[in-house]
């Protein structure tokens, strides 16, 4: 138990609310800038997706699941460790997932290509 008590005491010396506040204040501007850029990009993507849905004749009551598909693709496309053929295959898996939930695969494919510029997988 002495080790647990000692570890707790050491942690309490190192971690203080003032120290945490200082660390966050040091990076706040960068965090705010990156968050604003990400939200702007997300809103632009959703607007493009709505345009595709309108052109495809999808009723507005069905926009939510299609937007959910687009948001998943958005998250996937922003990951730095996935690109190229891996991204194409992962996008195809998402397309199949949402098609199995009852969405039109042609509309999903249009979102994939027109909004995200991700082509279909090679045969």
Image: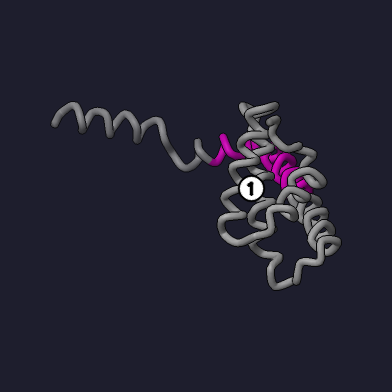
Counting labels gives 1
Please state the extent of the stretch shown in magenta in the rendering: 21-41
Q: Quadrant of the C terminus?
A: top right
Q: Quadrant of the N terminus?
A: top left
Indicate the position of residue 97 as horizontal and vertical percent values. Answer: 57, 50
Secondary structure mostly taken by the magenta-highlighted segment of the chain: helix
Q: What residue is at 76 percent from the left and 66 percent from the top? A: 58
Indicate the position of residue 86 as horizontal and vertical percent values. Answer: 63, 29
Q: What residue is at 70 percent from the left and 44 percent from the top? A: 35
Examine the structure image and report whether residue 37 is included in the region drawn in magenta: yes
Question: Please, is residue 67 above or below residue 73 in the view?
Answer: below
Please state if 31 lies on the left or on the right of 114 as rendered: left
Query: Could you say which quadrant of the image residue 54 lies in?
Result: bottom right
Q: Which residue is mark 1?
A: 95
Helix, strand or loop at mark 1:
helix
| Nearest the eye: 33 or 118 | 118
Indicate the position of residue 88 as horizontal and vertical percent values. Answer: 68, 34
Q: What residue is at 61 percent from the left and 26 percent from the top? A: 81
């Amino acid at each position: 138990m002495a080790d647990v008590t000692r570890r707790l005491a050491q942690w309490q010396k190192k971690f203080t609310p003032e120290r945490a506040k200082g660390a966050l204040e040091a990076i706040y501007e960068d965090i705010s800038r990156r968050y604003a850029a990400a939200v702007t990009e997300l809103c632009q993507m959703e607007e493009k997706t709505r345009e595709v849905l309108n052109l495809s004749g999808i009723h507005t009551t069905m926009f939510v699941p299609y937007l959910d598909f687009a948001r998943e693709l958005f998250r996937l496309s922003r990951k730095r460790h996935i690109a190229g053929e891996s991204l194409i295959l992962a996008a195809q898996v998402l397309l199949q997932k949402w098609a199995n939930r009852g969405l039109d695969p042609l509309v999903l494919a249009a979102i994939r290509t027109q909004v995200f510029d991700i082509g279909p997988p090679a045969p």
